[in-house]
């Protein structure tokens, strides 16, 4: 999940990533049909907002949430160019 703004997402994002702004992820995650035991990978520009989103999701009971950091780091971890 790309937790940046929709404008940032429109400029560049990882193929297949959902876009849910970190400020609304708590109330909008349910519309993404993500189960609480699904693996959820988060990224943003630098890793800060995805860290906030991780804490929000964990507080809601999501158990397999990972912060993949900024978009460049996430691409490396996912082996995408």
Image (spheres, rainbow, N blue to C red):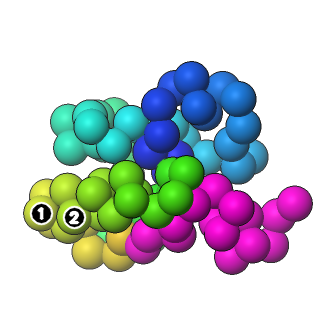
Q: Is residue 71 visible?
A: yes
Q: In this view, does 51 lie to the left or right of 13?
A: left
Residue beneath the point at 33% across and 43% down = 22
Question: Which picture quadrant has residue 10?
Answer: top right
Q: Mark 1 points at which residue?
A: 59
Residue beneath the point at 46% across and 62% down = 47
Cβ atoms under marks 2 and 1 closer than 8 Å:
yes
Would you say residue 45 sits in the magenta stretch?
no
Would you say residue 75 sits in the magenta stretch?
yes
Q: Distance between the residues labelled 2 and 1?
A: 6 Å
Q: Can residue 41 be seen in this view?
A: no
Q: Mark 2 points at which residue?
A: 55
Q: Nearer the viewer, residue 27 or 11?
A: 11
Q: Which of marks 2 and 1 is in front?
A: 2
Give the image location of residue 45, x and y in percent: 55, 51
Q: Which portion, as a residue range, is magenta? A: 66-81
Q: Which of 7 and 62 is in front in this view?
A: 7
Residue beneath the point at 61% across and 46% down = 17
Q: In which quarter of the image is the C terminus?
A: bottom right
Give the image location of residue 69, x and y in percent: 52, 66
Mark 2, other Cα within 10 Å: few <14 / some 14–19 / many ≥20 = some
Mark 1, other Cα within 10 Å: few <14 / some 14–19 / many ≥20 = few
């Amino acid at each position: 999940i790309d937790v940046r703004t929709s404008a940032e997402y429109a400029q560049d994002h990882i193929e297949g990533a959902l876009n849910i702004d970190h400020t609304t992820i708590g109330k909008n995650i349910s519309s993404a049909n993500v189960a609480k035991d699904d693996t959820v990978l988060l990224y943003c520009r630098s890793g800060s907002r995805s860290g906030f989103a991780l804490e929000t999701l964990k507080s809601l009971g999501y158990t397999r949430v990972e912060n993949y950091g900024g978009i460049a780091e996430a691409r490396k971890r996912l082996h995408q160019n």
